[in-house]
Image (spheres, rainbow, N blue to C red):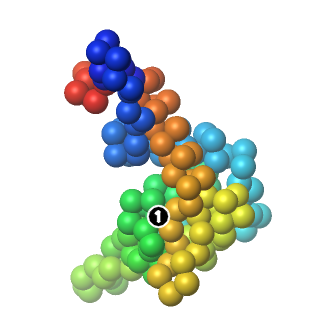
Amino acid sequence: MVLNAAEGNPTPMATMYDVPADDLIEALAEDLEERLDEPDWAQFAKTGPDRELPPEQDDFWATRAASLLRKVADRGPVGVERLATEYGGAKDGSNRYRVAPAHRSDGSRNMIRTILQQLEEEGFVETAEGEGRRVTPDGQSLLDETAGDVLEELDRPELERYA
């Protein structure tokens, strides 16, 4: 990433806002996959009451952890309740005749809380008393370093304005 290197100006560091969210989450998931342990119950648990089956992705736990780390850094300090709302969906009404309209349901708080606790153990997230969880300087530097790596690897013409 060389913005003004020809003029002798130092190059600014990429942040998580400089790259697309899906590419950042994918790269973070690769890094977090070896750091976080998926609990035994996670392969059987649904991600919310609006789902019929548990997720089928092999790297779901790491992907959800990367997504949560990004959301906490973006919206923090944030609590489990608000994060569960963000990961929720629409639960269908009556199954047999579809008489009742769909209702909003939240995501699994247990899954979110467990991932946040694992991220706290790794030192990426900390608890702010009475406010929720926020990202630590280590977590922010992980996000920024990963964003820099992602920005260098991206070969997308619409992102030339960042490089």
Q: Is residue 43 visible?
A: no
| The residue positioned farthest toward the top in the image shown | 6
Query: Which image quarter holds the C terminus?
Result: top left
Closer to the camera, 20 or 10? 10
Q: Residue at x 64, y 47 (%)?
A: 32
**Residue 2 shown left or right of residue 30 in the figure:** left
Rendered location of residue 89, percent (x, y):
36, 71
Q: Say above or below: 85 vs 120.
A: below
Place of residue 57 in the rendered image (x, y in percent of width and height, measured from the top left): 58, 48
The residue nearer to you, when weighing 26 against 7, is 7
Picture quarter containing residue 41? bottom right
Residue 161 in percent (x, y) is at 22, 27
Left or right of 117: which side holds 95? left
Residue 46 falls in image quadrant: bottom right
Query: Based on the displayed image, in which of its 4 quarters is residue 160 positioned?
Result: top left
SS at mark 1 in the image = helix
Q: Amino acid at mark 1?
A: Val
In the image, what residue occupies the spot 29% across and 15% down? 7
The residue drawn where x is 48% and y is 42% is 144
Categorize mark 1 by other alpha carbons within 10 Å: few (<14), some (14-19), many (20+): many
Residue at the spot of label 1: 72
Say left or right for 7 vs 65.
left
> Viewer-proximal residue, 82 or 50?
82
Residue at image coords 46%, 64%: 72
